[in-house]
Amino acid sequence: MTTTIKVAIAGYGNLGRGAEAAIQQSPDMSLVGVFSRRDPASVTLIDDSVPVYAMDDIEQYKDEIDVLILCGGSKSDLPEQGPALASLFNIVDSFDTHAKIPEYFAALDAPAKKANKIAMLSVGWDPGLFSINRLYGEAILPVGETYSFWGKGLSQGHSDAVRRVDGVKAGVQYTLPSESAIAKVRNGERPTLSTRDKHTRECYVVLADGADADTVRDAIVTMPDYFADYDTTVHFIDEQTLASQHNKMPHGGFVIRSGVSGTDNEQNEQVLEFALKLGSNPEFTASVLVAYARATYKMSQAGETGAKTVLDVAPALLSPKSPAQLRKELL
Amino acid sequence: MTTTIKVAIAGYGNLGRGAEAAIQQSPDMSLVGVFSRRDPASVTLIDDSVPVYAMDDIEQYKDEIDVLILCGGSKSDLPEQGPALASLFNIVDSFDTHAKIPEYFAALDAPAKKANKIAMLSVGWDPGLFSINRLYGEAILPVGETYSFWGKGLSQGHSDAVRRVDGVKAGVQYTLPSESAIAKVRNGERPTLSTRDKHTRECYVVLADGADADTVRDAIVTMPDYFADYDTTVHFIDEQTLASQHNKMPHGGFVIRSGVSGTDNEQNEQVLEFALKLGSNPEFTASVLVAYARATYKMSQAGETGAKTVLDVAPALLSPKSPAQLRKELL
């Protein structure tokens, strides 16, 4: 009998549910439990044969879990849970506050090293797969420019900002990459693009009773940090349309490296592009987390410890296949 | 003073020249010499201050080179040079005969391990970056299909086949991906595509004196293995047009993983795409080789030995930047 990698999930929102679904697609893994801060009896999993435990009891299970996938948020959950759990488990998380990654890395590295565990942080697509492609691009084509575009995607933070505006009853916000900017970049033009040039924003808003549409539109499009620097379009819709046509969480984007090779006398354009078109942002992020949980397990078995990111993970470690099989089938 | 990585090149055709240019773009490396089977006096480098040596003398330089980049061909050069040089140097090569990679891996692994060296094989874009993306795709989205498309690109092997046809004085062949097939794949349709469905072939031919165009066209489009399974178009042009409009070596292609996440009851389409648009195929391959020469050096410094492929290389090793700098700037 082959042993499977024993995985557990801490936090069961959209991301945790996506992780459960991704583990079901991975025959080399078994989900040994889900930990929640809610009453375990109130948490309904996809597979009701998997046990749900109280987060407070997690330490009791420290010898039964090979890798713990943290599915909490980056704002308050992970900065608190990550360092504490890194001293008990091999962990993987999707911490995505870019500016705070170095600080969070340090907060995980010490407890993980002390406990001989691995803490794999900031896994997902950005940070994550996009970061890897930014690195491949600049390492292979050192003379050039890197461009990251996001969307079309539902932005949680910007949707929250829209919903905080007086007169807004409900709403969502999509970030869209500018097609003309992408075309220039793909064409090797290496343009200088401002934030406004690269993306546009589209809001779908349900007005509160008696609210004035023009006042609400003005409040949104002039909002500093969130909308003032972009071309923002506001569409007013009814609640039914919002519920039926804006209930998915699509996302995606592009990383493009446009560079030149050759000599000063004869240069050649080289363009490398990585693109994602995601039907569900949380499910895709969870799928990335699960693949890196496999790598975390292998790295831990090989004796590695401490904080790691996707940049530290050799591609072969993500696969359930053997190195020889990978060379034969994929190389 | 920072020490640079001492790199040498074995073989100075288009690929070797591309490697010299890529090393010039890499301030952390210095090119200590080029080895050639030709008379060294007859080899003209981009930088004439770099010494050219006879290939037969290469063993004398074994303590002066950190990584040797092999720029010979996969058919006869590398199978002979690789195993011999792997016992003297850390080597990197672009061996691209897909079916023979497992055998070639084994032929390099033993001498490299014995000599405590690293032999990094099959580096480039396919095998290479495309292989990495096939792996990321299937590891992250285990339920799905992977599609590789090549082109538009000049194919050396197919151009040679065209030139061997009776009545052909000169000519080139381009492989083109089928736009309609790519559109279906990008759209998440996961079609079953035959070889003929995925690519078309385009030949530009200069006829020999007195040759019959129809006879030549028939001989090309019905050629087994090379053209019979494809929609092939043959254009007849004059020598001047061939020289002025078909003197570049563009290439490129796409790896697309189209998969689903979620549960049986509610699935979401997820599409991951990696694309290259290369102005010069040999220069890009050389740029990839040089980045992996850097990784080879770091892995050797860390005590690793034996045959390795791109699937074994953590992204961070490709960059001249420190892990902390990479986390701060790229993650």
Image: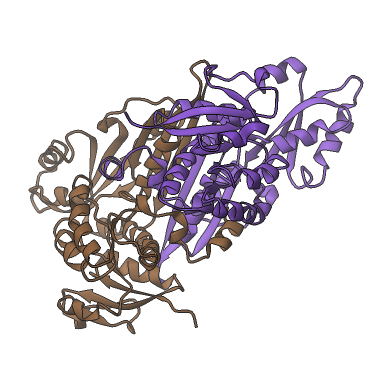
Chain colours: A purple, B brown
Image x and y of residue A173, in percent:
71, 33
**Looking at the image, can residue A19 be seen?**
yes
Residue at screen point 8% across, 50% down: B210
Front residue of A246/B168: it is A246
Front residue of B323/B206: it is B323
Front residue of A120/A240: it is A120
Residue B175, by quadrant, is top left
Residue B34, by quadrant, is bottom left
Residue A154, by quadrant, is top right
Image x and y of residue B104, in percent:
19, 53
Drawn side of residue B173 relative to residue A235, left or right: left
**Looking at the image, can residue B269 be seen?**
no
Front residue of A59/B19: it is A59
Drawn side of residue A94 relative to residue A138, left or right: right
Drawn side of residue A125 relative to residue A159, left or right: left
Image x and y of residue A177, in percent:
61, 41
Image x and y of residue B308, in percent:
30, 55
Residue at screen point 55% across, 42% down: A89
Residue at screen point 40% across, 45% down: A317
Drawn side of residue A113 relative to residue B183, left or right: right
The number of numbered badges drawn on the structure is 0
Q: Is residue B284 above or below residue A291?
A: below
